[in-house]
Image (cartoon, helix red, strand yellow):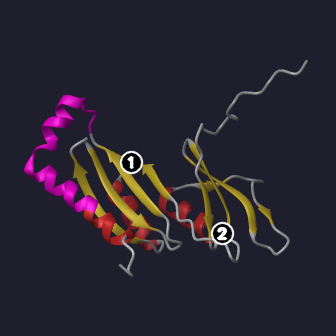
Amino acid sequence: MTKKPAIVPEGYHTITPWIIAKGADGLVTFIEKTFGGKEKEGSRSLNADGSIGHVEVQLRDSVILLFDHQKGWLETPAFLRVYVENAEEVMKRAKDAGATVVTNVTLLFFGEKVGRIRDPRGNVWWVHERMEELGWQEMEKRMHDPIQIENMRYVQESLDLVLRRQDE
């Protein structure tokens, strides 16, 4: 009798993002340049028309799956949170790789710096840098600090501006 394999394969997590992108190859390059990801050797397969049918990018302890958007499909941008060592540096690399800044790096009440970028294919990335480990009591106290209230307002409004439909 064969032993049943683990629920999640080694090297993956319970939830793994899958991005359908116009120009998945360019998105692989963007992830490599911005976040230091690396295409997993042997993971790329092509469709008959040469488009990417599957590719995987290793980003530290996580895997991002991608394939090319096909004609006639709905647009499906991804929204991803990435923890990094230096948010400002990652935001600079993202801009150099063609992203637009959605939210400048901002320190928030829960002890993390947060910035957002929109990559050249329309995906929005939350860039998080953990600054300190806080308990709920300290976070609740900081939530009422006028500076933190203003920071959160800015972070929320900057995303709203980018996602709001232009025809409203």
Please report whichever mark, 1 or 2, sits nearer to the chain's N-terminal start: 2
Please check the rendered image and state whether residue 163 is part of the magenta-colored stretch, yes or no. no
**Residue name at image x 23 percent, y 49 percent:** 108
Image quadrant occupied by the C terminus = bottom left
Q: Residue furthest left?
A: 146
Quick one: SS at disc 2? Answer: helix
**Residue name at image x 80 percent, y 73 percent:** 50
Estimate the x, y position of residue 123 in percent, counting from the top left.
Answer: 49, 65
User: Horizontal placement of 102 versus 60: left or right?
Assistant: left
Give residue 25's mark: 2
Q: Which residues are magenta?
A: 132-156
Estimate the x, y position of residue 163 in percent, counting from the top left.
Answer: 39, 69
Q: Amino acid at mark 2?
A: Asp
Estimate the x, y position of residue 122 in percent, counting from the top left.
Answer: 49, 70
Q: Residue furthest bottom?
A: 167
Majority secondary structure of magenta residues: helix
Neighbourhood count class around disc 1 (C-alpha, 10 Å): few under 14, some 14–19, many 20 upward:
few
Residue placed under numbered mark 1 in the picture: 85
Quick one: SS at disc 1? Answer: loop
When asked about the image quadrant of residue 138, the answer is top left
Q: Residue furthest front?
A: 168
What's the CA distance linking mark 1 and mark 2? 25 Å
Q: Amino acid at mark 1?
A: Glu
Question: Between residues 114 and 32, which one lies in front from this camera angle?
Answer: 114
Where 102 falls versus 136 (above or below)? Answer: below
